[in-house]
Image: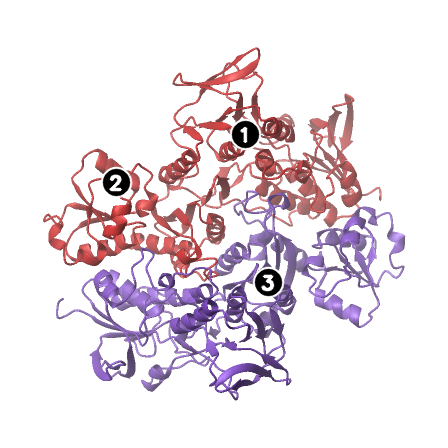
Chain colours: A red, B purple
């Protein structure tokens, strides 16, 4: 190694750190690259922990190996990447003046001062804990480290735990819920707010809630943890804010993470208003020789330019790559921001989202229109499965700024497709004519994404007036004076119906039975069918015949999350 | 109906026609809408025919019913959509002066003259036949009409046919091949050109070919049909251009379609240079009161603005919707063009594409760079499956202009994602940082699409020099003087290897064994591993140590379509 070799120091060995180090190595064979990792393991596939815990696979090595089966240990980093990896080593402080980092080797207690030309901070995040009595009891965990995964997998393998509580109704909470359920443990998810999965709008979240309940896992909303209960230092229950006590031998906390910014802060680096390390588009901190990436930083939303935190494994990898390149060729790569994309498997449902929810878009000040659409992912004759989605567009520009999609159907493809549309700042009109891959094993002739755009277009242009299932429920519950019309066939009505005071007039008979509709042409008429396509056709006709308050219940019966008559 | 009601006449009842009619109805309840259909059936799900033939589903009704199970017959169109559908009725001529269409009711032989204010031509396309002796023998079919589907399904149900030949190695040819194979029929696909699936580049097409052969269906390329052979009017074989005779009781022709433009041509409407009816962005023909859509028209490529034909069901539906809207509100909707997207299931492989192949892009005059990438769709621990893809970018602008993706993995999602990127005119740099939905059941931390962009970026910036598997094969076959390096582990090498004169030096040992590499630093060195990720890392190192001709075999062993040693 030449004595002029660039000295790169990377703090953090999980996702962003190793990625930055590896990319830097590919850019410069001669740089000196050292990776400091507090834990014993490196490059763990932490997003895979729930599937190991749930028994989807049994070989723990798969979490820490390359695809070729080689453990990513310091020897691997040395041999394959010529990166010195110091594990079980904690970075204690950064001296920006001297350009050094002081480290503590945890097993030996020895400290070491490492010089750098360029430094990368990828210190990640730490799980939050509710600050309540009993939180030191044995039997309370998170699923954050490989050690956590080992412990929860042991719970499965030992088969002694019968009841568990998951605290927090977000992505991780439900991944853990499913994993514990697969281990045969009766699991209840506790959510402090009124709604699970905060990136969804309430109507869709409620459908997911119903699905989880159908799997005999329980959910309690509007209730935080008041205390962990126990005996002899061991957890035996959780007490909720409302006083309810849930017996359980295991509690898993999944209430979010806090970026690890202590080191950066102590070094005087700028911390952003969202609590993460502030970085520019080159992933550079306020010190031009120090970069930061992953769960410890803030980045920019490409939807509205606000700073946000995005503690996701894919984002960490993307940012790490940008840093790796900039370490060697400064300002040659940039990370422009995120589009708020995420996904989660919850039992037989896929739950995905990109961009902003209706609630988030309104909160951000957008003037929006939305469309909720139900439909199959592929044709019925190919055994198509249901998708329910909501697309959000900015009314002025027509730009699509959000999409949520859930259900047993292939939501993953639709979310990826719209994520790319959002990245490209495409409008509803662009999506109206999207040329997507069509064949019956993969899509309807008009894919769910395109149909969603069509419905949204109809609403934006005033051709269709929609009403959400929750608004309809409110009307019904408050005894509002409206006429509710189910436009399906008598057979479908016989097999399943809402029972909310609706009148059945099949679409095919409607034009001959207009006299059964309200004489008052200004009375509110709410129409639906199974997915509200026939409902929409009927609505268009009624408007033409003079009714003025004709509304389509968006998504139809398939989007109705409340109890129904049959 | 008011006497001023707009009179809309639609010729063609398959996809674009009914879509235009139905959309027009939703736009205007009072228009008079008549649909003329030569066949007896309406709105048949013709893309579903192969799956009915192959026994994926057995209920024929599903091909002609709404999702709610109602047959889309004239009664349905009348009742549900107030559209008059005249089936078994052929449009004979258009009088543009008088604004009438003369029709023949086929069963009765009666003609009728129908007036229109606005006319839609959706006459579709007809299958091409090879003009060779014996083409009138019994046992030769296409899979174009519902009657064809019935006949081929009967072949399955009767179980008498043992050998079949499919003429034409495109999408439909392979869908038919799989369907017949599922019916227990030994099937051979004949392709006149040197390559199946012309929208793929040869290296990827070859991988698909291998897969088809592994299923014990056969493929013969570089051979057209010279004659159909038979006895007593019945097919008993196919003679190829090279004289080979293939015994078979069934031949299915799938060599493409010809747009049905006779009616339009006779009426003096402009026909484009690709042989389809010429239309503008509003789907209007050269007569402003006549629209046309579907397989009978030409449209525009959004990649290079050339006119193209795109005889696909989804495009017909998109165009039909645009017409339906413009019929009522002229010039209110437009169809800007296509991005050449398509997909097909071929046994366990998905074969998808969007934009231009390398060959098509070069032919269109683009200065391009490409990247072939192999990888899993989701993590190995989630039982990820292989994808092999090629991404094509315009060198000057960096715009992604093509993507092909094949394999047992979920190629459909990746093609849809890139199709949307192409629609948005996104660059490789945009894709480098795409925020796609990541969770282990759905994706790698860096999705295949993103990794493809990264590799392409490395090539565009000169950080990586690639060489295709076919170029490597040429080198090997011609005895070229190059050094071939496999960078995998000894165990992997033992289990499977190419056997093309390669030297094994595992990546982890490479830096200590540089003396085993050619002393001539300008000698060509070709590196690979299973997917050529380690190959790339090794290449970056070797370049740094002074070798100048270091090339990575793109896609690695997984993209190698030729025989290997083991």
Which residue: 48% across, 71% down? Answer: B305
**What's the distance in space between the residues labelled 1 and 2, CA to CA?**
37 Å
Asked if the residues shown at circle 3 and circle 1 are in contact, with their CB atoms under 8 angstroms apart, the answer is: no
* Callout 2 secondary element: helix
Residue on which disc 2 sits: A472
- Tell which of A127 and A241 is nearer to you: A241
Circle 1 packing at 10 Å, graded few (<14), some (14-19), many (20+), is: some
* Callout 1 secondary element: strand
Which residue: 75% across, 62% down? Answer: B564
| Residue A400 image offset from top left, x and y in percent | 41, 50
| Tag 2 subunit | A
Is A480 drawn above or below residue B128 in the view shown? above
Tell which residue pokes out farthest to the bottom in this image. B133
Residue on which disc 3 sits: B393
Report whether mark 3 lies on the same chain as mark 1.
no
| Tag 1 subunit | A
Residue on which disc 1 sits: A257
- Tell which of B349 and A204 is nearer to you: B349
Residue B370 seen: yes
Q: Which label sits on residue A194?
A: none
């Amino acid at each position: 190694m030449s004595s002029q070799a660039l000295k790169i120091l990377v703090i953090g060995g999980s996702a962003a750190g190793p990625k930055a180090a590896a990319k830097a190595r590919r850019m410069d064979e001669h740089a000196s690259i050292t990776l400091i990792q507090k834990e014993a393991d490196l490059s763990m596939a932490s997003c895979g922990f729930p599937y190991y815990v749930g028994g989807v696979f049994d070989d723990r090595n798969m979490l820490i190996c390359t695809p070729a089966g080689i453990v990513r240990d310091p020897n691997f980093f040395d041999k394959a990447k010529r990166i010195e990896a110091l594990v079980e080593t904690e970075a204690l402080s950064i001296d920006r003046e001297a350009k050094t980092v002081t480290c503590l080797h945890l097993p030996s207690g020895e400290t070491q001062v490492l010089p750098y030309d360029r430094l990368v901070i990828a210190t990640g995040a730490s799980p939050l804990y509710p600050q309540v009595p009993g939180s030191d009891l044995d039997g309370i965990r998170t699923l954050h480290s490989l050690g956590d995964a080992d412990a929860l997998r042991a719970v499965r393998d030992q088969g002694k735990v019968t009841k568990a509580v998951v605290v927090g109704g977000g992505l991780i909470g439900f991944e853990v819920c499913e994993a514990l359920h697969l281990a045969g443990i009766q699991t209840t998810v506790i959510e402090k707010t009124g709604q699970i999965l905060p990136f969804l709008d309430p109507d869709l979240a409620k459908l997911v809630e119903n699905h989880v309940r159908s799997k005999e896992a329980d959910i309690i909303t509007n209730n935080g943890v008041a205390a962990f209960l126990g005996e002899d230092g061991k957890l035996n229950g959780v007490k909720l804010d409302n006083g309810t006590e849930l017996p359980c031998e295991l509690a898993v906390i999944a209430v979010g993470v806090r970026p690890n910014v202590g080191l950066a802060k102590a070094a005087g680096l700028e911390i952003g208003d969202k609590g993460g390390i502030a970085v520019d588009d080159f992933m550079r901190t306020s010190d031009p020789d120090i970069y930061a990436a992953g769960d410890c930083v803030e980045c920019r939303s490409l939807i509205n330019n606000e700073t946000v935190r995005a503690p996701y494994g894919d984002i960490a990898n993307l940012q790490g790559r940008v840093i790796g390149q900039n370490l060697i060729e400064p300002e040659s790569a940039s990370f422009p921001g995120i589009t708020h994309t995420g996904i989660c498997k919850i039992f037989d449902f896929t739950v995905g989202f990109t961009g902003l929810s209706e609630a988030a878009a309104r909160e951000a000040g957008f003037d929006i229109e939305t469309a909720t659409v139900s439909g199959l992912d592929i044709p019925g004759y190919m055994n198509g499965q249901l998708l329910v989605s909501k697309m959000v567009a900015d009314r002025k520009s027509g730009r699509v700024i959000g999409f949520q999609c859930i259900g047993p159907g292939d939501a993953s493809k639709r979310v990826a497709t719209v994520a790319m549309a959002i990245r490209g700042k495409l409008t509803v009109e662009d999506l109206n004519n999207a040329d997507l891959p069509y064949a019956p094993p993969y899509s309807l002739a008009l894919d769910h994404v395109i149909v969603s755009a069509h419905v949204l277009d109809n609403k934006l242009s005033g051709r269709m007036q929609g009403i959400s299932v929750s608004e309809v429920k409110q009307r019904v519950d408050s005894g509002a004076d409206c006429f509710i019309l189910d436009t399906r066939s008598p057979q479908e009505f016989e097999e399943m119906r809402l029972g909310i005071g609706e009148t059945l007039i099949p679409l095919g008979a409607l034009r001959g039975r207009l006299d059964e509709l309200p004489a008052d042409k200004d009375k509110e008429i709410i129409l639906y069918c199974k997915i509200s396509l026939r409902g929409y056709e009927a609505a268009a006709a009624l408007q033409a015949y003079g009714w003025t308050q004709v509304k389509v219940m968006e998504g139809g019966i398939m989007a109705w999350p409340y109890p129904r008559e049959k």
